[in-house]
Image (cartoon, grey):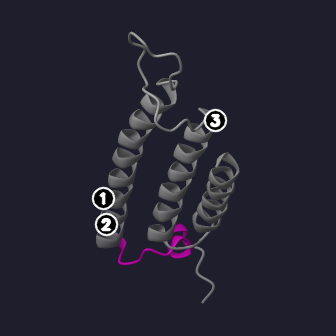
Amino acid sequence: MEIIMSVLAGMLFTAGVYMILQKQILKIIIGTALLSHGAHLFIITMGKLNRGKPPILSEGVTSYVDPLPQALILTSIVISFGVTSFLLVLAYRTYQTNGTDNMEKLRGNDNE
């Protein structure tokens, strides 16, 4: 199961980097979201996928799941949601102000 999750995280990283290298702002934002999802999968995979075991020690429990990766992912999900919403608002305001979402035109590198 860890191999499948690692391959999926690698595919998300690859797609995220590809999307970040595009010219449109919305594709760049989608790329950052894909990168954050890849990081979430990577963290949960490194924490070992143990199914059906409790994350907290109590009486009679001999094996448990490490709760630290779960806590890190919860924090990371909240942060990535905030960053994504900020980037979407920034892209909206940029489009309203400049009338384009093309990064080449926003930089002033028109080849026309």
Q: Which residue is drawn at 64% across and 60% down?
A: 17
Q: Does the magenta stretch include residue 106?
A: yes
Disc 3 packing (10 Å; few <14; some 14–19; many ≥20) = few
From the top left corner, tell me how far across and down residue 101 is, in percent: 43, 74
In the depicted structure, whether residue 74 falls above or below residue 54: below
Q: Which of marks 2 and 3 is in front?
A: 3
Q: Is residue 43 left or right of residue 53?
A: right
Q: Which mark is residue 92?
A: 2
Q: What stretch is highlighted in magenta?
A: 98-108
Residue at coordinates 57% horizontally, 45% vertically from top-left?
39
Q: What amino acid is labelled 1 in the image?
A: Val
Q: Is residue 56 above or below residue 52?
A: above
Instruction: Kindly identify which residue carries mark 3.
Output: 46
Check residue 89 in the rendering and tell me which mark sits there, or answer none.
1
Q: Is mark 3 on a helix, strand or loop?
A: helix
Q: How crowded is mark 2: few (under 14 residues within 10 Å), some or many (20 or more)?
A: some
Specify which label sits upstream in the sequence, 2 or 3: 3
Q: Image quadrant for the C terminus? A: bottom right
